[in-house]
Image (tube, rainbow, N blue to C red):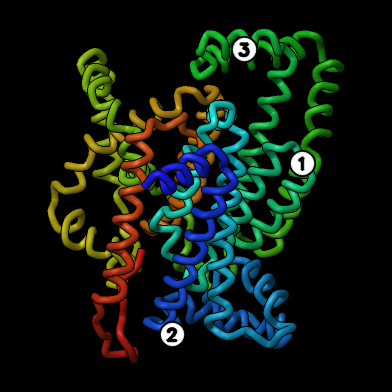
Amino acid sequence: MVIIKSLFLEAINRPIIYQSIVSFTFVLLTTLLFLFLNKIQPDHYIDEVFHIPQTKKYCNGSFFEWDKKITTLPGLYILSAIILAPFQLCTTIYLRSINLAGTCINLYLIYQILSTKKWVQKCKAENRTWLPFMVSISVTLLPPLYFWHFLYYTDVLSVNLVLMMFLLHQRQYYKNSAIIGALAILARQTNIIWLILLMGERVLTIIEAETPQSISALQDRGIHGTSIHARLIWNNVRHYVQRGIGPFGSFVMRIISYLKYQLTVILLFVAFVIWNRGIVLGDRSAHVATIHLPQMFYFSIFTLAFSWPYMLPHVKSFIQWICKHWIITGLCLAIVTAIVHSNTLVHPYLLADNRHYVFYMWNRFIGRYYFAKYALIPLYGFAIYATVMCLQDMRYLSKVLYAGCIAVVLIPQLLLEPRYFIIPYILVRLSLPEPKLWQISLELMTTLVINFLQFYIFVTKTFYWTDQEGPQRLSW
């Protein structure tokens, strides 16, 4: 026991040891799970019936043959063909292994992004690097993302590239960040929004640099997360406006020069949209843009489900806020109720495909009982309030920017699809402050339990369709 204790203490004091052990264990267990699940599901699963044949066409050099049912750009197919085609390995299991590798890469990228946070640097100084590493493991294991590590879907690569874009941006490699952003768009068109978010963040940083002492004062006083931050930014902009067209024009051109790489990618994307006469490829009938405001409410529940340990401490203040601001609460309640009543939309796919959890949630609860959708309104309110409170250390206009970009990504989507929430959630989760031990422990426990349940259900709960061979299984 003494030897084990001494080895444990040595590992804790030398982060490279336990990080290597945990990382190796994560990769090993994920690989074993990958191999097991591929034995269980060797055939194409749901959208793989489109993705895998299309990639095989690319592997065979048929780059101009396109399945019109595919609506995303071919980033995943191109990458897979580049890696696997020279070795003639474009089989189902090898194509799926692209996402296995991507899942392991996610762990590295998430940890590196966290390493730029002030609370993580403080942990390193205090020899507590295990804490951000636990956060990295927990976020990597996010069930709606981790599930796809053994299948050939675009989600893992999309997350890889967005995280890489954010990491390069944080380290001020803006040109490389823009290049990776372009590749992220090739994986999924909506990733253009995250490039725009980073561009907006840099604009804020540039404007803040005009009055660094004022920004430092806000940070020291802990009020840079309030509307005072917006007022300071506006004062900096107004200063150039008042000086006349010349100085203001020079200021704008200076900002544009800093953003030239991101603007180039955006202009190329706009050119593509004009040429393609729309954002999506192929069959657009199932992906018509709409206004679906409850998507933001669904996302708040998604965030609450996986970050509840961080939101739990805000229950008391939420109740106090309601009692103190009962007029505003009543107004918000009326607005949200009106939105839920008039703008709760249902995509035909949601009602038709019983291989997704959302199908059962809707048909057995939300869509089955008239008052069910209204019963969730208090939960929406708490989830939104708690999320805002958890992000109170983020600068005010950054919160506005994040909320706006998440809204632009989610609200046009008619289909209620948990996979749409993955990147918005990860960006919010990585912005949370330092967790307490009980919070990260419960978060990690939550992800492990849900992962166990989702894979158990996938393996054991099968059913059959009359028009398809083989068993059908449940997923996100």
- State how far apart marks 2 and 1 are (Cα): 41 Å
Residue 97, position as x, y percentages in the image: 56, 73
**1 and 3 marks in contact (CB < 8 Å):** no
**2 and 1 marks in contact (CB < 8 Å):** no
**3 and 2 marks in contact (CB < 8 Å):** no
Is residue 348 visible in the rendered structure shown here?
no
- Residue name at image x 52 percent, y 48 percent: 18
Horizontally, residue 115 falls left or right of residue 325, namely: right
Name which residue type carries label 3: Leu
In this rendering, the label closer to the viewer, 1 or 3: 1
- State how far apart marks 3 and 2 are (Cα): 58 Å
Residue 162, position as x, y percentages in the image: 61, 51
Specify the farthest residue to the front.
2
- Residue name at image x 68 percent, y 87 percent: 88
Please tell me the numbered disc located at residue 173: 1
Residue named by callout 2: 42
Helix, strand or loop at mark 2: loop
Disc 3 packing (10 Å; few <14; some 14–19; many ≥20) = some
Is residue 30 visible in the rendered structure shown here?
yes
Name which residue type carries label 1: Tyr
Give the vertical position of 280 relative to 90 (above or below). Answer: above
Give the vertical position of 61 relative to 111 (above or below). Answer: below
Figure quadrant of residue 359: bottom left
Residue named by callout 3: 232
In this rendering, the label closer to the viewer, 3 or 2: 2
Figure quadrant of residue 169: top right
Horizontally, residue 67 falls left or right of residue 350, namely: right
Asked whether 138 or 182 is in front, the reply is: 138
Residue 475, position as x, y percentages in the image: 34, 68
Helix, strand or loop at mark 1: loop
Helix, strand or loop at mark 3: helix
